[in-house]
Image (cartoon, helix red, strand yellow):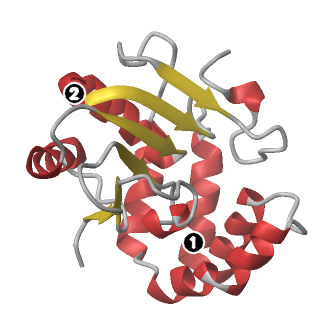
Amino acid sequence: KNEFVMVGEGDPSMVLLPGWATDGRIFEGVLPGVTAVTTGPLRLDRFSRRLAAFLDRTARGPVTVVGWSLGGFLAAEFARECPDRVRRLVLVSIRREYPEGDVQAVLRSLSTDPVPCLSGFYAQCFYPSQMPAYRRFRGGLQAGYLREMDGIALREGLSYLASARLSGETLPACPVAILHGEKDVVAPLAVSVLW
């Protein structure tokens, strides 16, 4: 399975980086008509180098990089390391940091009983869980994620999040937009990099 995937026709104008325990399929239908690069499960080691090499082969110019949660930390890192490749950065549901105790609790839960751990995490991502988007996700993509889960990649993602930090001082020099849902329980506005 390829790490990076082109969605749409022609020269990509965007890179879409998913959050923890998801992959690029989470973005299906979000930006119709836009040619974008997205990913399979995130592999963190030398991520920026591999993404830059892929863009060298597929994109003629700088792109907008959209990163959600874990993907947001990677997007900011990529924009700092490869500034000539990034036109602008959009960070969605990003925190300054994740408390180590919270990350360790998810890691313990994942090790003990992964399906309920991930199912609970997905429900938090779609809070309030009665929303139609969550019912569609639960009835479709969630089953695939639970069936295909890669325990090593999930633990690597948690390890990365345990040490990831982002602040106004560490944001890259390109234009940056930070988006939060008003009811986001995983990355509430109060713990955003804006504050």
The reply to whether dot 1 and dot 2 touch (C-beta < 8 Å) is no
Say whether residue 56 is visible.
yes
The residue that mark 1 highlights is 110
Q: Where residue 83 sits: x, y (%)?
A: 23, 23
Secondary structure category for the residue under label 2: helix
Q: Where residue 96 sits: x, y (%)?
A: 57, 27
The residue that mark 2 highlights is 81
| Residue at 35%, 13% in the rendered image | 173
Question: In which quadrant is the C terminus drawn?
Answer: top right
What is the number of callouts on the image? 2
**Mark positioned earlier in the residue sequence (1 or 2):** 2
Query: Where is residue 37, by image quadrant?
Result: bottom left
Question: In which quadrant is the N terminus drawn?
Answer: bottom left
Query: Where is residue 8, by image quadrant?
Result: bottom left
Q: Amino acid at mark 1?
A: Leu
| Residue at 50%, 33% in the rendered image | 90
Query: Callout 2 environment at 10 Å: few (<14), some (14 to 19), or many (20+)?
Result: some
Residue 138 vertical position relative to residue 88 in the rendered view, above or below: below
Say whether residue 161 is visible.
no
* Camera-side mark, 1 or 2: 2
Q: Is residue 6 left or right of residue 124?
A: left
Q: Amino acid at mark 2?
A: Glu
| Residue at 46%, 80% in the rendered image | 149
